[in-house]
Image: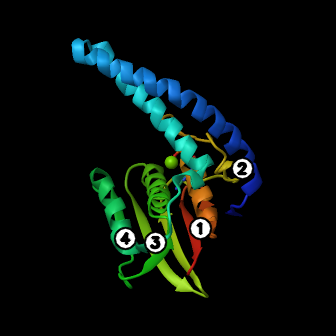
């Protein structure tokens, strides 16, 4: 099953509502966190630490939500991104998973540069790679490749994970769609928004039980 992911309008309208809510909740939560920190200066109680870490989770979700729904808020400029170096540093964040997962990364053309908004771009590939790791139960493989073709730079992230069935494929990128007990369902929303913001395309190909490939195409500027 294959799908080209370009539901720009759907994302935009859900995103606007979500961003509005996120913004309204974020401010009061941020002040609660500030008062909590003041409280912790004068007394200690395990509940205070728990409250702080739960608040941080909520703020993190809201931050993600704001970022996916209003990527232009990040207000970054386009820079040259050193592809191999940055992908390698993203991979290094998953060190503890490498015992079960074999990673194959294309190091030909290690000087290859992509043009993008660095933070958004890295976050998008972090999200794709994280999903790839999470799709693998037990042992498996992840493969990252990149090449130039017809004025586009292609980057593919493939895994030998659980795969995605046809009905779930339709849901990908919808904010909060997640099949994971600890998932936020915001990762792919961020990915899609960012790739579109860069004038690119993203396609997904998946076979249940065999694995998934996310194929990103970005214009070479
Ligand atoms: P989350 O990872 O928090 O669940 P995402 O937006 O990153 O949210 O992904 C949404 C859903 O898409 C996942 O819950 C999963 O069902 C599916 N998915 C995404 N990437 C993959 C993948 N590489 N393999 C299998 N399923 C995937
Ligand atoms: Mg994810």
Q: Which callout, 1 or 3, points at the residue further toward the start of the chain?
A: 3
Dot placed on the residue nearer the N-terminal end, 2 or 3? 2
In space, the residues marked 4 and 2 are separated at their CA atoms by: 35 Å
Of circles 2 and 3, the one toward us is 3
From the image, tell me which residue sits under label 2.
12
Residue identified by numbered label 4? 104
Return the disc, 3 or 4, that comes first in the chain's sequence.
3
Q: Is residue 17 above or below residue 153?
A: above
Residue 40 coordinates in the image, percent (x, y) = 27, 17
Which residue has dot 3 on it?
79
Q: Position of residue 188 (x, y in %)?
A: 57, 52
- First in sequence: mark 4 or mark 2? 2
Q: Secondary structure at mark 1?
A: loop
Q: Which residue is at a point 42% across and 54% down the rendered structure image? A: 133
Instruction: List the residue tagged with mark 1.
Output: 198
In-front residue for pair 25/90: 25
143 is higher (above) or lower (below) than 109: above
Q: Nearer the viewer, residue 10 or 117?
A: 117
Which quadrant of the figure has residue 94? bottom left
Look at the numbered disc 3 and give the secondary structure of its residue. Answer: strand
Q: Residue at x 54, y 79 (%)?
A: 153
């Amino acid at each position: 099953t294959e799908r080209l992911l370009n539901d720009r309008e759907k994302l935009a309208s859900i995103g606007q509502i979500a961003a509005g809510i996120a913004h309204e909740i974020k401010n009061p939560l941020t002040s609660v966190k500030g008062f909590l920190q003041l409280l912790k200066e004068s007394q200690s109680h395990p509940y205070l630490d728990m409250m702080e870490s739960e608040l941080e989770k909520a703020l993190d979700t809201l931050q993600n939500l704001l970022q996916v729904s209003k990527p232009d808020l990040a207000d970054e400029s386009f820079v040259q991104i050193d592809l191999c170096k940055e992908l390698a540093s993203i991979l290094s964040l998953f060190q503890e998973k490498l015992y079960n997962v074999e990673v194959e990364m294309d190091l030909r053309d290690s000087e290859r540069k992509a043009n993008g908004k660095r933070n958004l771009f890295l976050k998008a590939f972090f999200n794709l790679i994280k999903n790839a790791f999470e799709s693998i139960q037990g042992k498996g493989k992840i493969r990252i490749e990149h090449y130039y073709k017809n004025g586009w730079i292609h980057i593919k992230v493939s895994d030998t994970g659980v795969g995605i069935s046809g009905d779930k494929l339709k849901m990908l990128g919808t904010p909060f769609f997640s099949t994971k007990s600890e998932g936020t369902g915001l990762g792919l929303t961020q990915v899609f928004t960012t790739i579109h913001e860069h004038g690119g395309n993203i396609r997904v190909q998946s076979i249940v039980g065999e694995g998934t490939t996310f194929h990103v195409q970005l214009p070479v500027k």
